[in-house]
Image (cartoon, rainbow, N blue to C red):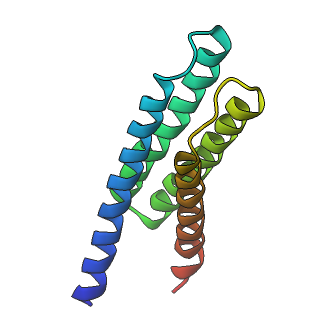
Amino acid sequence: MKVVNSTKMEFAESLRKRTKKFAIDVIKMYRKLPATEDARIVGRQLIRAATSVASNYRAACRARSDKEFYAKLSIVVEEADETLFWMEILKESGIHNTPIELENEAIEILAIMAKSRKTAKYGNTE
């Protein structure tokens, strides 16, 4: 049982680091956006969503109950999807092309979090 617990803790820690790095990478990308009003507006929305992914995942890891964990993870999924939305807006409006690595990271984080949420909901039915 300790091995499973240790593995879960290591996985959670790696995701905490990964989502934090993702948020920082989005902030760095924001700094490269053109100095236009539309770029600032969309860019700020992007930063808000990406940093929310990291902060809410961190909060989920500190959840006091399964319900609280599930609720926080649901926020993470929503914010990860919103992050992708703002990246699409930047690209499709011609404001800025999001680096493909950053876009792929957003897609992967969304997939991991959605799967984790599904597991949390259906895996704890004992």
Horizontal and vertical percent position of residue 6: 24, 78
Question: x and y percent of residue 126 in the render?
Answer: 51, 86
Q: Of 55 and 33, which appears nearest the observer?
A: 33
Q: Is residue 68 left or right of residue 36?
A: left
Examine the rendering and report whether any part of residue 124 can be seen.
yes
* Quarter of image, res 118: bottom right
| Residue 78 drawn at (x, y percent) | 62, 48
Residue 44 on image: x %, y %: 55, 23
- Which picture quadrant has residue 3? bottom left
The quadrant the N terminus occupies is bottom left
Q: Is residue 69 left or right of residue 20?
A: right
Q: Can you say whether 62 is above or below 29 in the image?
A: below
14 left or right of 38? left
Residue 63 visible at all: no
Residue at 57% across, 31% down: 46
- What residue is at 64 percent from the left and 28 percent from the top? 96
Total number of numbered discs in the rendering: 0
Residue that extends furthest to the bottom in the rendered view of this protein: 1
Where is 107 relative to 35, above or below?
A: below
> Residue at horizontal 51%, vertical 30%?
47
Residue at left offset 65%, top offset 41%: 82
Q: Residue furthest right?
A: 92
**Residue 124 or residue 102, whichever sits in front:** 102
